[in-house]
Image (cartoon, rainbow, N blue to C red):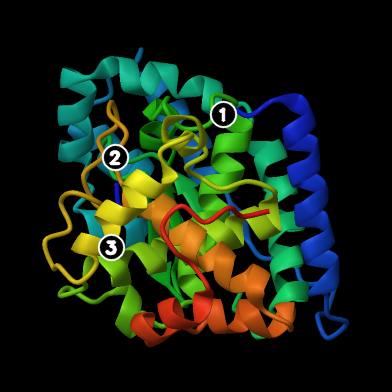
Amino acid sequence: MKWISVGVVIGALACAAISGLAQSASSTDFDPSVRPAIHIEDVDRFYKVYDAAGGRPTADQLQHDYLDPGSDGLHEFAKLRNISGARIAETLSSHPEIYSSAKRCMLVLPRVRQRLEIALRTLGRLYPEARFPPVTIAVGRGKPVGVGGGPASGVLIGLEALCATNYLNPDVEDRFVHVIAHEYAHVQQVPALVDDDNATVLEGSLVEGAAEFTAELTSGEVAYSQFRRSTQGREKEIETAFVSDEDKTDLSKWLNNGTPEKPGDLGYWVGYRIVKSYYQHAADRRGALREILEMTDPKAFLAKSGWYPGIRLQ
């Protein structure tokens, strides 16, 4: 995620289908005792500082009482995204509601951690080669929502940014679980493809689509579930336009164009549909998931996927 309903009966059928796919791809090679570290203690420390200062902590307090004693994940997040006491204080001054509102999301974190442990163990069963770096949920400067920091630092999530992105799943517990499952899939992917600064629309969309599909397979839902409604009945129209743009390196129509207030990144949805088509056409589902996460040639992947604009998927 760069920044990152159907009816009850349809939803139940989708969950049953995902469960069936997971069972068909399951493996006995995974150690069920594996418990990936999921850190939420930085959030508690931030709000102790915040509350003690009446919601107006200074840059110095934020730096010395929150950031400096923080977890390794928080320190990595700060380095990657230029988070400092001064930057947080600036956002607090201009958008105090982001931090006051985020307290509601803080309350769901223990349950989020429990559900993520289950989702990541599912990933290990379906993809025995999976790496399990930590997940760190912390408070930042209002953006980004999340970063796949890599095999060492793992996944880094900005509580306040994700909490404020209300066009994602309206259930904040679900939102955190599915977005983090999406970001965790990026950690498993080939770095050269994930970090390609010259990616085409197709390449970028398949990277994100693979993360969306993996999130669905492991946590039960994609991170960008809002696209189901906005794309309904327009699949062929949207995907025909995508084909015209797939080799372009100007991503602005399809990727990296969302904000906390306005949804974007329609390429995630198209990429997800291509990846799901690949999986559903595969005779070996377990092998297919490996090929999805270890993809290095997006053009060859597309050719093998069986996807075409407007395809109907199960």
Position of residue 17 in the picture relative to residue 72 (left or right): right
- Say if 26 sits above or below 262 in the image: below
* Disc assigned to residue 243: 3
Residue 310 x/y as whole percent: 46, 52
Q: Amino acid at mark 2?
A: Gly
**Circle 3 or circle 1, nearest the eye:** 3
Residue 304 x/y as whole percent: 50, 82
In this orientation, which residue lies closer to the viewer: 210 or 71? 210
| Label 3 to label 2: alpha-carbon separation | 18 Å
Q: Residue at position x 40%, y 68% from top?
A: 206
Structural crowding at the residue carrying mark 2, measured as other residues with C-alpha within 10 Å and reported as few (<14), some (14–19) or many (≥20) = some
Structural crowding at the residue carrying mark 1, measured as other residues with C-alpha within 10 Å and reported as few (<14), some (14–19) or many (≥20) = many
* Disc assigned to residue 172: 1
**Circle 3 or circle 2, nearest the eye:** 3
Q: Are marks 3 and 1 in contact (CB under 8 Å)?
A: no
Q: Is residue 275 visible?
A: yes
Q: Which residue is mark 2?
A: 264
Quarter of the figure with residue 11? top right
Structural crowding at the residue carrying mark 3, measured as other residues with C-alpha within 10 Å and reported as few (<14), some (14–19) or many (≥20) = some
Residue 181 x/y as whole percent: 57, 55
SS class, disc 3: helix
Q: Amino acid at mark 3?
A: Val
Quarter of the figure with residue 127? bottom right
